[in-house]
């Protein structure tokens, strides 16, 4: 079994981006600028947004973090998005999800200008992605493709099983793995909570991408020998062994599957860092499109 090392690969990508930022500035352009909006104080969302802001610093981007209390009105949030949409200094805008129940997430997503939607969540960008037109790919699926590519994983003609149909990961991932490209050209099965005989399907997977948010759900008995596993899950559970009092678990039971798979992304240090690296890449693309 070989580890698909997302942490190392993400660091390689960040170094490549940092070099491009230096070249941009040398040619008289401004620094790329990512704005993030965080609503409320959910622990996991705070961690992710802080990691995104820190990553901006590391590659030489400017970043702005706008925070709202969880009782902010939808109107006030949309007004801030419009302000950032019209700020020429800002290249990319993300609104960290999930949002409180009283705010319509799709309305928020649709308000972000597609040209600044570096998360790749806007319906226009999802449509362009589905048609294989140039766009911002959603960061997590893009990070998975990049990881498969950099480790030269064979995908053509393989059976790729995706577990979970979220708009952010499962759905776009299934579209991208079926596309006529590399990585891609897979026969794809998209499974979800209503799927019957899930184990029978996962047992036929050459590539298994799991994004359902259930800690350690996948075990060895669900797999074919030699499968490539991409684990998108990150569930925070209490732990007495860590300084923070938390530890992160994937959707795959690593110890159970490690001798049966050929490649696997660890949690942490797999897909998570790649998501951030691809968000930076999208922001750089946006900045360069104006230079
Ligand atoms: N919540 C979980 N993943 C993501 C992501 O990639 N982007 C945003 N904006 N929110 C998220």
Image (cartoon, rainbow, N blue to C red):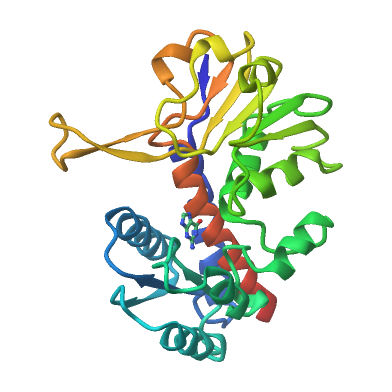
Residue 237 x %, y %? 27, 37
Residue 14 x %, y %? 49, 53
* Left or right of 187 in this view: 252: left
Query: Residue 236 occupies which quadrant of the picture?
Result: top left
Q: Quadrant of the C terminus?
A: bottom right
Query: Residue 58 occupies which quadrant of the picture?
Result: bottom left
Identified at 39% across, 68% down, the residue is: 100
Q: Is residue 225 above or below residue 38?
A: above
Q: Is residue 11 visible?
A: no
Q: Is residue 45 visible?
A: yes
Identified at 63% across, 23% down, the residue is: 198
How many dots with numbers?
Answer: 0
240, 139: nearer the viewer:
240
Identified at 74% across, 37% down, the residue is: 183
Residue 104 x %, y %? 51, 72
Q: Is residue 272 above or below residue 229?
A: below
95, 103: nearer the viewer:
103
* Left or right of 258 in this view: 181: right
Identified at 46% across, 25% down, the residue is: 217
199, 81: nearer the viewer:
199
* Left or right of 39 in this view: 169: right
Residue 139 x %, y %? 57, 54
């Amino acid at each position: 079994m070989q580890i698909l090392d997302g942490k190392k690969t993400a660091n390689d990508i960040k170094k490549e981006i940092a070099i491009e930022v230096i070249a941009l500035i040398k040619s008289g352009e401004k620094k790329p600028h990512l704005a993030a909006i965080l609503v409320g104080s959910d622990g996991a969302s705070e961690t992710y947004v802080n990691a995104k802001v820190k990553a901006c610093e590391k590659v030489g981007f400017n970043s702005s973090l706008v925070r709202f209390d969880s009782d902010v009105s939808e109107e006030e949030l949309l007004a801030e998005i419009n302000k950032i949409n019209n700020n020429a200094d800002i290249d990319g805008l993300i609104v960290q999800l999930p949002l409180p129940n009283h705010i319509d997430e799709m309305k928020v997503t649709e308000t972000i200008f597609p040209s600044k939607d570096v998360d790749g969540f806007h319906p226009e960008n999802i449509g362009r992605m589905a048609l294989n037109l140039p766009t911002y790919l959603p960061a997590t699926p893009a990070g998975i493709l990049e990881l498969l590519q950099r480790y030269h994983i064979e995908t053509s003609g393989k059976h790729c099983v995706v577990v979970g149909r979220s708009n952010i990961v499962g759905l776009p991932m299934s579209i991208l793995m079926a596309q006529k490209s590399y990585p891609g050209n897979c026969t794809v099965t998209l499974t979800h909570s209503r799927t019957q005989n899930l184990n029978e399907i996962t047992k036929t997977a050459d590539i298994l991408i799991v994004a359902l948010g259930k800690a350690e759900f996948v075990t060895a008995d669900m797999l074919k020998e030699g499968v490539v596993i991409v684990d998108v899950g990150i569930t925070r559970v209490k732990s007495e062994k860590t300084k923070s009092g938390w530890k992160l678990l994937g959707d795959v039971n690593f110890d159970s599957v490690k001798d049966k798979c050929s490649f696997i992304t660890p949690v942490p240090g797999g897909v998570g860092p790649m998501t951030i690296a691809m968000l930076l890449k999208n922001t750089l693309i946006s900045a360069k499109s104006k230079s």
